[in-house]
Amino acid sequence: MFRMIALIAMAAAAGSPDSDQAQSFGQWRTETLQNGTVRAYTQNHSGSVFGISCHQLCRYYVDVSMRCADGDVYNHPVSGDGIGSEITLECRTQDGSQILSVKDDSGMIPLLKGSAISFAFATENGRFSFSRFSLTGSRQAIAWTIAHWKQSKAAHDAQQGGAKPDGAIKDIVL
Amino acid sequence: MSESVTIASAPQRALIARDAICPRTRTGAPRPLIARFRAAAGMLATAIIALAMFGASPAVAQDQVPGQWRVAKVQGAWTAYTTNGSGSVLGVSCASTCRYYMNDGMICDVGGLYGVMVAAPDPRDLHLSCEHVANTALLFFRDDIGWRLAGDFIAFAMPIGDARFSVFRFSLAGAKEAVAMAAARSKQGAASAVPSRSGGDLPYGKPIPPKCNWNGKWPVPKEDCIVN
């Protein structure tokens, strides 16, 4: 009986955040998953999520519950405070759900300096849907996430016998 | 292949935006019946006045094609165009080649590159470059959107900063016929019967707003002029 309860608890904890590491910064929240992923995100009132997820590397992502094919790439207009831009999103499966991962961070950085960011998505009936997210607290949350991820990764690499960092890992300028 | 697109001077564009900022604004509650009657009466009166003024003019009479699109000759280029309820224009200008353009009434920086998302079919990001033609700020599509002129309407979403988008919706009723007519007449050259247009409606859309004077109220309301 105890073994069964322990197994259920382990299964539940596998993809869940470590509550000790969860923090809030304004409208943003940070958390560390059991698999080592560190992320910062915000959720709007429609349930859509925008954030950054750091595992092997850090990537911004949007989760608007849009069905997409894994690996598909889309160009999307994005609107920030006083600026608009175009970013490339890649459909990826993460933790069992499909998300749109930003392929090139450089296009995101100017957009993150304002108080809100919006993504446009075309719907099948020829109309558009817009997902708007608050950026209040995003700078602190993202900075915390990246710093924490770097610490975790350094500790992990040390445990692995001083493995060299992955060449794809890069800093994100905020 | 992704190309970096800068939305040049977005606040300036937003300053004189007339189209709806978001779909919710555009698709508000249905108007009361009395308001619809008033609007219909207003349009009828406008149509009667327009007929009285221009009814005999071949420039107006001959450039109309069935549907919401029209054909006109502007500065040597045959142009097929449509104007939506917000005054934004979608058209194609045919000289040696045909180029699609849009004018949303907002200023744009000459040579600036803008991004816009087009809805179905095949939703994707399109690029437009800004040119000032005949005192209008036109955004020319860098892609051929001719094959998209099917169905009832075409819609675009453009980021305008402030985490907002402008949405532009144009009727495609008569679009194919009008575009074909403009292309055909541009090939015929001077043999066409329709004279060049001057005045009347604006195939290139709203002109570039004048700069504001010291108090921002003359010669046009503050929201319609450019503050430098």
Image: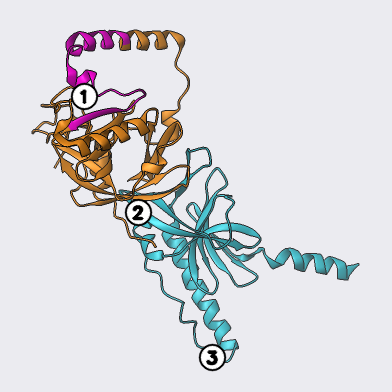
Say what amino acid the circle numbered 2 marks. Ser
A43 sits left or right of B125 in the view: right
Q: Which mark is residue A85?
A: 2
Q: Chain of mark 1?
A: B
Q: Residues within 10 Å of mark 1 (few under 14, many from 20)?
A: few
Q: Which mark is residue A162?
A: 3
**Residue under disc 1 on the same chain as residue under disc 2:** no
Chain letter, colour cyan in render: A
Q: Quadrant of the C terminus of chain A?
A: bottom left
Q: Position of residue B44 (x, y in %)?
A: 31, 9
Residue bearing the label numbered 1: B201
A1 sits left or right of B70 in the view: right
Mark nearer the viewer, 1 or 2: 1
Q: Chain of mark 3?
A: A
Say what amino acid the circle numbered 1 marks. Asp
Which secondary structure, mark 3? loop
Can residue A75 be seen at all in this image of the molecule? yes
Say what amino acid the circle numbered 3 marks. Gly
| Measured Cα–Cα span from mark 1 to mark 2 | 33 Å
- Residue A112: which quarter of the image? bottom left
Pointers 1 and 3 in contact (C-beta within 8 Å): no
- In the image, residue B219 above or below residue A90: above
Magenta range: B44-73
Pointers 2 and 3 in contact (C-beta within 8 Å): no
Q: Quadrant of the N terminus of chain A?
A: bottom right
- In the image, residue A116 above or below residue B48: below
Mark nearer the viewer, 2 or 3: 2
| Magenta region includes residue B6 | no
Chain letter, colour orange in render: B
